[in-house]
Amino acid sequence: MASHCEKHHPHTDSTPHLNGEANTHLPKKPKISSTSISESEIQSEFAHHDPSVARINNGSFGCCPSSVISAQQQWQLKFLRQPDRFYFNDLKKGILESRTIIKNLINAEHIDEVSIVDNATTAAAIVLQKIARDFNEGRFEKGDAAVMLHYAYGAVKKSIEAYVSRAGGYVIEVQLPFPVKSNDEIICEFRKALERGKANGRKVRLAVIDHITSMPCVVIPVKELVKICREEGVDQVFVDAAHAIGCTDIDMQDIGADYYTSNLHKWFFCPPSIAFLYSRRSPGHSDLHHPVVSHEYGNGLAIESAWIGTRDYSAQLVVPSVLNFVNRFEDGIKGIKKRNHEVVVKMGEMLVEAWKTHLGCPPSMCASMIMVGLPSCLGISSESDTLKLRMHLREEFRVEVPIYYRAPRKGETAIVTGYARISHQVYNKFEDYVKFRDAINELVRDGFTCSQLSK
Ligand SMILES: Cc1ncc(COP(=O)(O)O)c(C=O)c1O
């Protein structure tokens, strides 16, 4: 059981003693004022979750409380009851109200800068199609560079391939270390990639920067990277912040990117699917278009996106109800974010203490998700192993958690090759993490390795 001999990572030195069998007490619940939502109200808001499952993967698909699901159903009924009235009287007004709430939450300067789209994938297509037009219509030259993180989300990488590479862009990946110890490591690699981008007199036209990378999961020092892009003359900066709103602090004027997108269905309690796309007012701003062209083409992205044909717009209309929901918690969404961060770090530390492994980054570089090293004796040796183990945990132990494969570098021995990304959201309980800990302990005790799982 090699992993149990792993040296402690320095980040785990202050581990609170939540792990071993002697310590099965619940961590103290945050103090909730008398006006705040009660624990039983929280559980009833999420009573539709399968109670047999330890759902410690809010990051992938988020969650939606029942009060918001009811509000969504009201909107759907409103449409079905009298569609014409809904279309002419309610839809535009409702979407504008949601945009206004989002504008205030993200500190955008102007309401025109905020559009609502289905998801981060759609937002990426909008931005990257614009970049493709810049190439195809001669504003950028073939061979000009685009820089993206090696850990960019797979679907966004495909979008860069489909739009930027095909239009003649030269794509450079920023190689990031993992496990990562400091922002400086990221900043240093980013600078190196920009240097490569600018080699031979090339221009760097686009930087795509994640705010919170998906896998492995790390909060990127996005404000610093945007500033470097400005100093180095990068034309456009797109921040893929699919996880950010409700998970980490975001402020459009402070971050200073040209484009910034975040899903509201991950950490902001909206039903699927809704994301905002922020686009800073600039000369190119009016050349952003929704990929689905409809009546509003040419009227600005926010208006185009508010009508892309007949469909269900209810997810875009429940933002005021979500705000009511989060404001039932002490300090609203700010308090939720803070407590999620504190608890996920504690849970991560509890797990690495139990497994004698380490976290993937210091707590200061994570928000409501953290990467937790798995015992190396599990024999995780490929991405396919991570999928098989994930499925095994789902089917045999009722634990829902994504896993990352980190290939050993040359000369590295007995290292952690698998990391679980654990999330914490308001519905989670200490028992969820204990269930995960005990599932892994059982596998280790039984001498399980991934090679035992069928293809
Ligand atoms: C960093 C990142 N970008 C984009 C996406 C895509 O989000 P969606 O599937 O909601 O479009 C995700 C989803 O997990 C993500 O983590």
Image (spheres, rainbow, N blue to C red):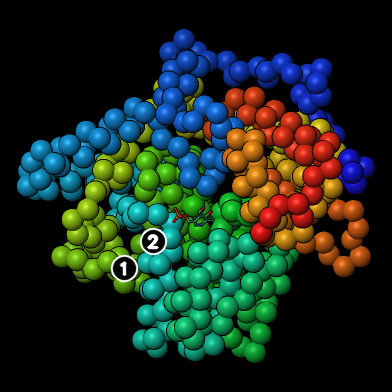
Mark 2 and ligand 1: say if the CB distance to the nearest ligand atom is below 8 Å: yes
Task: Name the residue located 67 percent from the left edge and 79 percent from the top edge.
Answer: 196
Q: Secondary structure at mark 1?
A: loop
Is residue 312 left or right of 224 when viewed as pictured?
A: left
Can see residue 154?
Answer: yes
Residue wearing tag 1? 291
Q: Marks 2 and 1: in contact by CB < 8 Å?
A: yes
In the image, taking residue 330 as reference, residue 342 lies left or right, namely right
Q: Position of residue 389 (x, y in %)?
A: 68, 48
Quadrant in the picture for residue 188 = bottom right
Q: Mark 2: few, some, or many residues within 10 Å (few <14, many ≥20)?
A: many
Residue 388 image position (x, y, % from top left): 66, 52
Label number found at residue 311:
none
Compared to residue 202, the image places residue 387 above or below, namely: above
For the residue pair 43 and 208, the one nearer the viewer reads as: 43
Task: Please give the name of the residue rendered at 19% of the width and 66% of the height, measured from the top-left corner.
Answer: 294
Residue at image position (74%, 31%) is 438
Q: Quadrant of residue 444?
A: top right
Q: Is residue 161 above or below residue 333?
A: below
Residue marked by disc 2: 122
Given residues 352 and 334, the one toward you in this image is: 352
Give the camera-side residue of 206 and 62: 62
Q: Measured along the vertical axis of the image, is residue 134 above or below residue 241?
A: below
Left or right, 144 with reference to 79: right
Q: Is residue 181 left or right of residue 267?
A: right
Quadrant into which the C terminus falls: bottom right
The residue positioned 49% from the left and 86% from the top of the image is 168
State how far apart marks 1 and 2 are (Cα).
8 Å
Q: Residues within 10 Å of mark 1 (few under 14, many from 20)?
A: some
Amino acid type for the residue under numbered disc 2: Thr
